[in-house]
Image: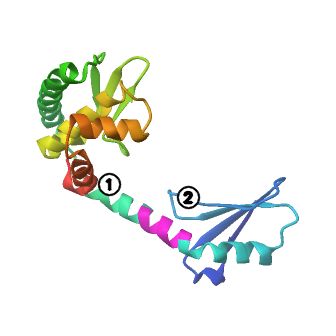
Amino acid sequence: MDLRERRSMNNRYKIEVTRKRIKNMYLRVKDTDGTLSVSAPYGMSDTEIRKFVESKSDWIEQTTQKMLIARQLKEQEPVLAPFMEREIRLELKRQLQRLIDKWEPVMGVKSAGFTIKKMKTRWGSCNVKSHHMNFNLLLAKVPPECAEYVVVHELTHLLEPSHNARFWSLMEYYLPGSKELRKQLAGFSAKDMI
């Protein structure tokens, strides 16, 4: 392993180069400290590696910026007292159950229950084989119509597993205006939440 500072990247990035028995070069940014990790073939020169990294400067900037924002949001996220989180979970569970009870007969589907979880990248998920759904705890902080959109979205997966044209057509059929609700939901981020 070869660990170096590269002045060509404005002294901003530490680059870790690992030479391997591979054909192409690969680059990733470590989320722990922002180090650029390059995997390169054994025969690749330092100059070729430097040019490769420099050619990816836009991607590196975007990726490190996203990581910085994610880290800041996580630091800003207040810690909930256990009893407060329990209350929020209970209220969300009641809200989601009312929505499921409302929509299952309308859509002609039956779920096998749901779990509320802290999820980083999804508002909900549905296991189409077991019919069990998962919902993000952060739904407790979005407008009720957005939570309803997520419930209908996951129940729609019981009719159409993939996000194809039929799926979106069914969403619009059962929940007219679902496209606008989807955009509204996409406008929320962790800083707006719990």
Distance between the alpha carbons at the discs numbered 1 and 2: 17 Å
Does residue 55 appear to the left or right of 85 in the view shown? right
Spot occupied by residue 39 in the image (x, y as percentages of width and height): 73, 59
Label ID, residue 46? none
Report whether residue 136 is seen: no
Does residue 12 appear to the left or right of 114 in the view shown? right
Question: Residue 191 magenta-drawn?
Answer: no
Q: Which residues are magenta?
A: 59-66
Label 2: few (<14), some (14–19) or many (≥20) C-alpha neighbours in 10 Å: few
**Dot 1 lies on which element?**
helix
Above or below for 110 versus 124: above
**Dot 2 lies on which element?**
loop
Residue ranking furthest to the right: 43
Identify the main secondary structure in magenta: helix
At a point 78% along the width and 75% down the height, the residue shown is: 48
At a point 36% along the width and 64% down the height, the residue shown is: 69
Q: Which residue lies under the disc numbered 2?
A: 30
